[in-house]
Image: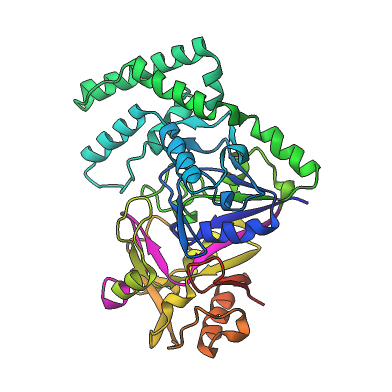
Amino acid sequence: MGCTVIIGSQWGDEGKAKMVDYFTRDTDIVVRYQGGANAGHTVVAGGKKYIFHLIPSGILHKDKICVIGNGVVLDPLQFIEEMELLDKQGIDSENRIIISDCLHLILPYHLAVDSALEEIRTKKIGTTVRGIGPSYSDKCLRIGIRAGDIFEEDVIKARVAGALAMKNRLLKDVFGKPEFTIDEIMAIIHKFKEKAGKLIRNTQNYLHQAISEGKRILLEGAQGYALDIDHGTYPYVTSSNPTIGGALLGTGLNVSNIDEVIGISKAYLTRVGEGPFPTEDGGSDGDRLRVNGGEFGSTTGRPRRCGWFDTELIRQSCKINGFTGIALTKLDVLGGFKKIKVAVGYELKGKRLDMFQTYNLHRVEPVYEELDGWDENISKCKSADDLPSNAKDYLRFIEQCIGVKIKVVSVGPDRENTFIYE
């Protein structure tokens, strides 16, 4: 018994939360391993929509334990708000959530610095301004505040004072922004301790013990491969590693614990914010994908950029992550298109490229093949046999191009609109 890892294979927003919810049925523990409240994971169950930013999507399953791993940066106030919202919806969260004592906290000065930095950038990154990058920066600078620190009053006061000495000087002297007092920061920490202190523990040991007891673990990432700070389209990336390496670093598990790595892909492609997007469609087809797919960010509400499936991007994602299978979402959104484009490679100045390179991605031209579309409403399909022939052809073509089997297909927003693809 071991772990299954769920990884976004594109630029995020691939439907990971729905797939986590789907795979959670055969799981005992769900672990969020990186990112923070910049991620918005949406699950539709029984016609009701739930949006999570920090709490793992598996919380909707009553008998599952949800772990927030050491690789996450956690906004205490956002976390408390999510817990209170779940309680109002009748979902028991307090007794089923465990927080790593090694994860770093996002505090108000992180959000202030994040906002100030975005203001002065000549080229906008498109950050959600949730304090994610500054918190990870403090982690590397070794001035961050970890969840376990809240139990040592003298220690945490000293660390907050040290961090504030730097942040206040930066905010006041460089950005001309208001400073923070130690009392207002400590008030947030004390509230977090009161509301969530009993949830904090050594999650690395907990997960290894769970594996030794034969329990199944699902690791849930935020964002996607192409937003990885090392492997993505830098600098238009997130501040962490959504890829397989981040799954190990963000949980304390090791490679021998991993059984499956499932890449989540949309049947088309979207991106939020700035950065290269070779298959983006700025015309009526892109608008149609946006409207039909409801492509508006669950965290920011921003309309997503939309375009066609990019096999070159996914092939690179497969190399980096070692996917054992693909879960393809939103196949139903392609219904009604007479022709569906699929990018099978890139050209630069008329020459076909033989490898994926992020540094010139803004200059490449996609090489498309067109497949026949379908008019049928496939949202009621329960198996591959129910799909129209052209939809089956589309799935087979993608499999041939990327060299990885599609294992699960989603044809609608509800958890019931999902089936094993064989």
In the rendered image, residue 139, in percent from the top left (x then y), is placed at 47, 29
Residue 383 falls within the magenta-colored stretch? no
Answer whether residue 348 is visible to the viewer in this image: no
Tell me: residue 71, above or below residue 201.
Answer: below
Tell me: residue 200, above or below residue 32.
Answer: above
Q: Quick one: quadrant of the C terminus?
A: bottom right
Tell me: residue 297, above or below residue 119.
Answer: below
Magenta stretch, residue numbers? 259-286
Q: Nearer the viewer, residue 397 or 49?
A: 49
- Using residue 343 as the reference point, say whether residue 71 is left or right of it: right
Which residue does the image show at 39% across and 86% down from the upper left?
339
Count of marks placed on residues: 0
In the rendered image, residue 336, in percent from the top left (x then y), is placed at 39, 85
Residue 282 falls within the magenta-colored stretch? yes
Q: How is the image coloured?
A: rainbow
In the rendered image, residue 205, in percent from the top left (x then y), is placed at 71, 33
Tell me: residue 80, above or below residue 353.
Answer: above
Q: Nearer the viewer, residue 13 or 340?
A: 13
Which residue in the rendered view is the most extreme toward the top?
Answer: 154
In the rendered image, residue 216, in percent from the top left (x then y), is placed at 72, 50
Which residue in the rendered view is the most extreme toward the right?
Answer: 213
Which residue does the image show at 40% across and 45% down from the upper left?
38
Q: Nearer the viewer, residue 306 or 27?
A: 27
Answer whether residue 66 is visible to the viewer in this image: yes
Quarter of the image where one finds residue 333: bottom left
- Using residue 116 as the reference point, say whether residue 417 is left or right of it: right
Which residue does the image show at 41% across and 71% down from the upper left?
346
